[in-house]
Amino acid sequence: MSDKTPYFSIFFLLFIILFVYFGNYFYHTSAYIIHKDSILLTPSLIHPFGTDRLGRDLLARVIEGGKISITIGIGSSLITSLLGLTIGVSAGFFQKTVDKFFIVLIDLFLTFPTFFLLLSLVSYINASIWVLIFVISITGWMGMARMIRSESFEIATKPYIKILKLAKVSNLKIIFKYFAPLLAPIFFISFTFGVGGAILAESGLSFLGIGITPPQMSWGSILNEGKAVIDIAWWVSFFPGFFIFMVIFTLINISDFLQHKSNKKENIFA
């Protein structure tokens, strides 16, 4: 990986986030108004991303849909990472009965294929931003928990941790002062991967028609609307798909960069 690649990815990701959350201040076209005389117009100066089959401006819809997609991605990943961190550290630090309980819990969740579990939950609950954040979160924390548990076990075997326990130092103090700094790289790597995974999960559900429902929109739901006219209006599917691809691509580059830096630090202290 080029030394400039992660910085380009960070810059491009920030650009997309700013574009999505502040684009309405510069582009004032409504994402909801139907224009019967502007159905499936190709990209132009008037409609930079073209229009959809109801004559709605696609650029405005991509901006509006991006807010929901990125909010779900960040919200789900934050909850997933914190949940995985809490469970993983608890299992690795306390071990014994606590560890056995969490192992059974993790294995129970891993028994069900994640996407089918998502489908099952969403089928019985009316989808909204907060419902999707909750559902994606509770079906995606297991991998993070297992990684943190493994690292926590290794940290718990360090001599200074054993001395601190014998000295009856507060468990919370040990966890926050000694475990947290060592686990931070794994947390941030998992978080960046999690954002991309949550956006893909939401997009997949919306593409199947069981995610975000009108009048709300996400990149996945816009992509779903475009599949019916993809043979005559490629732009309806292309632009939301492009933004999903670029967010996932930049997040993967950032995750690889963080992992590379983390591995270098481990080699130095080895």
Image (tube, rainbow, N blue to C red):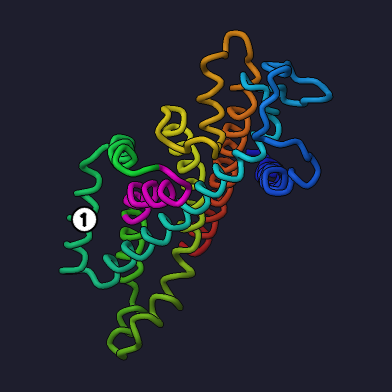
- Label 1 SS: helix
Identity of the residue drawn at 29% across and 35% down: 116
Badge 1 is on which residue? 105
The front one of 225 and 177 is: 225
Q: Quadrant of residue 82?
A: bottom left
45 vs 103, left or right, is right
- Bounds of the magenta segment: 127-145
Up-down: is 171 above or below 128? Answer: below
Magenta stretch containing residue 130, yes or no? yes
Up-down: is 126 above or below 159? Answer: above
Q: Quadrant of the C terminus?
A: bottom left
Identity of the residue drawn at 30% across and 90% down: 168
Q: Main secondary structure of the magenta part?
A: helix
Q: Quadrant of the N terminus?
A: top right
Q: Residues within 10 Å of mark 1 (few under 14, many from 20)?
A: few
247 vs 87, left or right, is right
Residue extending furthest right? 45
The front one of 141 and 66 is: 66
Three-letter amino acid code at the position of disc 1:
Leu
Residue 84 percent coordinates (x, y)? 36, 58
199 vs 66, left or right, is left
Magenta stretch containing residue 120, yes or no? no
Residue 83 percent coordinates (x, y)? 37, 60
Identity of the residue drawn at 59% across and 22% down: 237
